[in-house]
Image: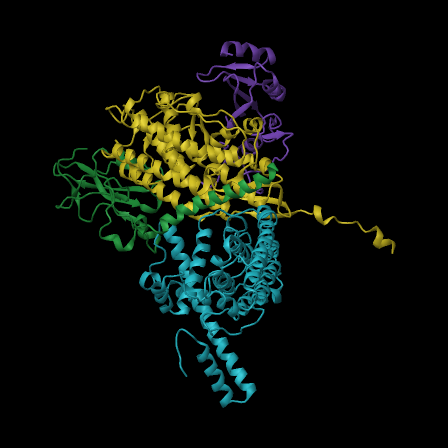
Amino acid sequence: MDNAVLKERILGLVPDAEYQENKQFLTFIIPPAKMHELAFKLKSESDLAFDYLFCLTGVDMVKFLEVVYHLESTTHQHQLELKVRTDDRVNGAVDTVCDIWRTAEFHEREIFDLLGIRFTNHPDLRRLFLEEDWIGHPLRKDYVDEVNIVEL
Amino acid sequence: MNSFFTYFTDIFHAVKSLLTGMKVTGRYFFSPWEIVTQQYPENRKTLKMYDRFKGEVIMPHNDRNEHRCTGCGICETACPNGSIEILQAKIDMPDGKKKRIIDQHIYHLGMCTFCGLCIKACPSDALAWGQQFEHAVFDRSKLTKILNQPGSSIIKDIVE
Amino acid sequence: MKEIINLPVKNVEEEEYHINMGPQHPSTHGVLRLVVSLQGEIVKNLKPHCGYIHRGIEKMCEKDTYPQIIHLTDRMDYLSAHINNHAVCLLVEKALEVEVPERVKYIRTIVDELNRIASHQLWWCSFGMDMGGLTCFFYGLRDREKILDIFEESFGSRLLHSYYTPGGLMMDIHPDFQKNVKAFIKYFRKKIKDYDDLLTGNVIMQLRTKGVGILSKEDAISYGVTGPSGRASGFSCDVRKHHPYGVYDKADFKEILGTTGDTFERYMMRMHEMHESMKIIEQLIDNIPAGDYTAKMKAVLKLPAGEYFQRVEAARGELGVYVVSDGNKSPYRMKFRSPNFSNLSVLDHISRGCKIADLVAIGGSLDYVIPDIDR
Amino acid sequence: MNFSIYDFTSFTQWIDKFLYDNLPAFWAVVVEMTIIGIVVLLFYALVGLFLVYAERKVCAFMQNRVGPNRVGPYGFFQTIADLFKLLMKELVYIKNADKLLFNIAPFIVIIASFMAIAAIPFAKGLHAIDFDIGILYVIAVSSMGVVGILLAGWSSNNKYSLIGAMRSGAQIVSYELSVGLSLVTIIILAGTMQFSAIVEGQANGWFIFKGHIPAFIAFIVFLIASTAETNRGPFDLAEAESELTAGFHTEYSGIKFAFFFLAEYMNMFIVASIAATVFLGGWMPFHVGGWAGFNHIMDFIPPFIWYIGKTFFVIWVMMWFKWTFPRLRIDQLLTLEWKYLLPINLVNILIMAFIVLMGWHF
């Protein structure tokens, strides 16, 4: 499925998805509430068949926190980039997709650990790299650590 | 009956595979000329590192105790780890102007990751890779080196 | 009497206990801690605890310029340092729309494949050692040393090279490079027979690995298990084939896919891959075109604002680099999708119900490098 | 006294007579035992040290290395240096460990191997005791070592140790059978369990040649089973350093660890001696029927050298096993014993009994 058809298909599934210009991937910004439903359809519908989540990451855009999903279909070889945004820096939460793509379990734990985005319904949302009593989320732009971060 | 035969063929194949493995180790046991280890401290005299070996960053000096460093500080900004510090000094030129020259080129070997960005960035080729690799010392402060030798000066034909 | 009868009968058979494998355990290949629940010798489940060597490379990248990032990616999967660097270089070149000279592409591809062989050799060593065959360790290292010598001659270092730079290479290859690589291939084709005799064909090794730790194709895709481990399950995930970079589109090589997805298949994938890598090198080594070793690059590299993604096939699977740039000389956010991280997440799933010895074999066959998991 | 290196009988009898002539009977026994004790202890330490060195050199050569080469010529005194290191190391006491058993365990292991060495004939007339049930005694005593291993694993209060000890228990209990039965094959052929008589019985040909194929199979089975019984690779599941870090001796340090270490090598020496004595003719020289000149030259080599040479050959083969093969898994280990070695052994005994009955052996 080429990108133009895929774009129509995604917009058909989620009409309020916002298309974003991107040279490499077809990119959409998805409302957080619709993400899980869309993810399920992307994986299960045979003409989409996005079965491989090859990257899942979070970005702190200062105004909002963003979770970026990079998807690929191993049968149709098409790729897709989805973004979910949350404004709440304290309790911002996104639905987990680890019941759809199992690899998301670890990636979501990493994002929770380093960026502090919560994932609802995640089976084991603990810090992955840092200790349980660590304060703050290091990959956020407003994170200050005068002891461990050496300014050159 | 079939399983009876597979029982014996299994044993046969197993023994055969084990003997193939033993042949390999046995062969090496009886061919000591294939030993690959180097006798390190003994071969120090004959040990020659490759020309491009990255041992440490050095500043080559010629026999008149002159180097090529202008003290511009590009290497300092190129270094990702802050292992280079440039201390500049000002001298009075004969024509009355003040000129910045290098006072101390401080190199923290303990922080260096040997990426080579300083050498690549240097506009006057003042830095080079040294071949020395035995860096172990008992005190960390000994790993901080001053690359320009005391009393050294810049080669005349270098222009900033 | 009544109390005695009413006492809850504790079934000893079902009692579980936990052991900590790691952070200092010989078979976790570094500082990984696995909390393993055991019932006798049977693994009930395990929980990986990462972060013992977390250095915050992604955070450090936000302060570094793009050429400086290279020396950090070296230190992620240190066994395939060149390939990690390749990912960042390709990304910067793609963002800046720089066309690198053909010579650079050829050299990078050859060096990547050499690095892949070196990495698989070390994997073979440590896999043999995990299985209890200590001699494997020395044979593998002996042959890896030849590659490291080639690396040292050309790039000056043996493990962490920082050889690629955005736009090209740090320096040209050594004049003897081609001769030595050809000599190595000739040497290694002979020596790889030892590997097969000593370990592959060995009945003990086959008994211990066949049918152990089976990963189905669906699970491999769902867990994002890539590289030789993923291909053993039949998941066609070779980035070199699907999204070619370098000069892989000019080389003729096969993407070998497994069927069973057990530990032995994962083992065989890497053995095949060493042969394939040698084939690639042989095709390219004589055809390195003359030319410059680096493209003309600006002194300060500033990526146009936007986001970029680059995938390469590292020795252990797919390495993805995701960069969000705000137009400055250092990235706004840099994410490395490391292959080992996803491969580790499957360990719990495939090792349930096997024995401790199997867990070690499965861990060896997934071939994780801890600094790449933690970053 | 006529002392010769080919026959120690007169020498040992002379000492015996000398002691009984000059001392009361009780003290003569005490002095005799002390001498034997000291000699065995010295021998034990020397062989142990040498075997550690030999193992390191053998594995080094198999792995394209040189092995220890720093202390003394060719690193010959490396193990002595290691011994001093181990002697000086701190003995770490484990909290919550069963102190008594924890301390006793290494001694049980080492005493078991001490006792076994007493019955082994090193040369003609050179053995501490010549039991008429020598083989039975050695098997019985050497299997005592597993008690020490079990205690060590249990008292350490460490889960790795416990798993290692339990593995070792299961392993030794099952492989004991194969060791015993493969020796029974030869006992049928020899008609005696006395070591000296077994060796004498091989004067006209070693049992491995005399007993046709069954004796050879018994030898192979004995080699495999005894490797397993000494907890050596590929059967080193009790230690399994890549799985259990160090297995049953994880918590031991210093000289107590050295005891386990030494006992492992001495057990290897003991099973190799038994293999040499029972299958390869003990201190009997190698003879080929009809080659009188060759046989004469062989006779010229002292029996002690023959014995040591054969023993070390068997030890070398066992080292070869260890440095070639990957480790088995516990269930495969038991499968190998109960589904392969034991049935083969039983059939083998039947065939051997039949051969002896029909008088087909040489």
Q: Is residue B110 above or below residue D222?
A: above
Chain C hue?
yellow
Does residue D341 appear to the left or right of D61 in the view shown? right
Residue nearer the viewer, D114 or C150: D114
Q: Is residue C375 above or below residue A96?
A: below
Place residue C143 in its image quadrant.
Answer: top left
Q: Tell me the residue at 57%/57% (across/down).
A: D358
Q: Residue placed at 53% from the left, 18% from the top?
A: A75
What x and y, as percent, mark residue D49? 43, 65
Across and down, in percent, residue D139 comes to 57, 63
Q: Is residue B102 left or right of residue D313?
A: left
Q: Colour of chain A?
A: purple
- Check the rendered structure and report the hue given to chain B: green
Query: Does the image show residue C215?
Result: yes
Image vertical order of residue C97 relative to residue D129, above or below: above
The number of numbered badges drawn on the structure is: 0
Query: Which one is in front, A130 or C274?
Result: C274
* Colour theme: by chain
Residue A14 figure quarter: top right
Q: Can residue A129 be seen in the rendering of this structure?
A: no
Residue placed most toward the observer, B138 or C83 = C83
Q: Residue furthest right?
A: C2
Choose top left, top right, bottom left or bottom right for residue A131: top right
Q: Position of residue D131 (x, y in %)?
A: 56, 72
Query: Residue D213: x and y, percent?
Result: 51, 52
State the hue of chain D.
Answer: cyan
Q: In the rendered image, which quarter contains the N terminus of chain B?
A: top right
Q: Which corner quadrant holds the C terminus of chain B?
A: top left
In this orientation, which residue lies closer to the viewer: C58 or C212? C212
Is residue C217 left or right of D319 when viewed as pictured? right
